[in-house]
Image (cartoon, rainbow, N blue to C red):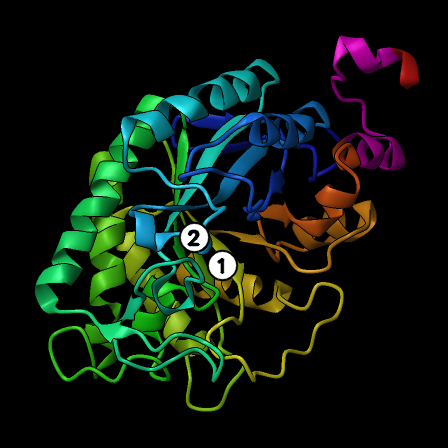
Amino acid sequence: MSTKLFSPLQIRGLTVKNRIMLAPMCQYSAVNGIANDWHLVHLGSRAIGGAGLIMVEATGVVSEGRISNGCLALFNQAQCDALKPVTKFLKSQNSIPAIQLAHSGRKGVGDWEVYAPSSIAFSEQSKKPRELTAQEIYQLVEHFSHSARLALEAGFEVIEAHMAHGYLMHQFLSPLTNKRNDEFGGSLDNRMKFPLLVAQALRDTWPKDWPAFVRISATDWMQGGWDLEQSVVLCNALKKIGIDLIDVSSGGTVANASIPVAPGFQVPFAKEIKKQVGILTGTGGLITQARQAEDILTNQDADAIFLGRELLREPSWPIKAALELGEKIAIPKQYERAY
């Protein structure tokens, strides 16, 4: 292999065939949290297109943990069984099946009561959440463990905890959304407690030879909010737990943040966390060109590229990137005539 983008990435006992990973993106197409043909074809197409790892969308660990009525969930057998054909097909294409476990907290928009670390609404148009009790917080840790066990049964090989984009675990982390005065609020250690309990539960549940990721927002893009300095402290704690890769994003906590969106705008966060913590990082955010992705990796700014909207636009982006970079990769035999 002459390029970094198409070099394998070894994480614990798994080898990802290249550094291109499908970012988790809600499809709003599930019924009662259950995957269907859309998820199989959507995710399977990106595996056919050459992505090394396919991350399933934010998947609720309880019904009210979904973002919307159309989002996936994983807390019962029917939801588990519906995902088995998906993981089977992804593996048949030599792509690693991964799933992001999540809880929407105050940002849920379905027909249920929302709750959060503190009773602060996301916006004037949003529901006002109920403040969680300490007992409920500990119960949620158990829900994450239960969903992880179902993910294992469903055939996933990588698990990711969603601590980004203003959803429940991020709500605990940010001082803008966490105004508690108990063991789960106030100091940085207290605000990190629930997310770290979840990370520990997932690591304890997941096989030792398989990776566990965490997605974070490195900054709220808001004065007095969550920032890179706190992210480094969190990532050091996650590394000690045994988390293998930090999937670095940003924003999502508050509705009025001003985010300087530009090509590669989140790369500096991944670079700094990789440098200061000494942990694998993935990056995303307006990465659209093969050479752009290759440069990020060769500059050691990150270890993997998470592509979202670009893979929606072009499911075969990895194959085209390989051609552009002069890299020879395996192409499904059914498609070889096209190349």
Q: Looking at the picture, does residue 129 appear above or below residue 205?
A: below
- The residue depicted at 49 percent of the width and 59 percent of the height is 274
Residue extent of the magenta highlight: 319-336
- The residue depicted at 69 percent of the width and 27 percent of the height is 45
Front residue of 19/193: it is 193
Q: Residue at the top extreme?
A: 333
Q: Could you tell me residue 92's position as x and y percent?
A: 57, 13
Q: Is residue 5 magenta?
A: no
Which quadrant of the figure contains the C terminus?
top right
Image side of residue 154 versus residue 219, left or right: left
- As measured in the structure, the alpha-carbon distance from the residue carrying label 1 to the one carrying label 2 is 5 Å
Q: Could you tell me residue 132's position as x and y percent?
A: 19, 69
Q: Could you tell me residue 93's position as x and y percent?
A: 62, 17
- Quarter of the image for residue 210 reads top left
- The residue depicted at 50 percent of the width and 46 percent of the height is 70
Q: Provide the residue designation for mark 1.
A: 274
Q: Provide the residue designation for mark 2.
A: 279
- The residue type indicated by label 1 comes to Lys
**Whether label 1 touches label 2, CB < 8 Å:** yes
Label 2 secondary element: loop
Q: Is residue 209 visible?
A: no
Q: Looking at the picture, does residue 267 appear above or below residue 255?
A: above
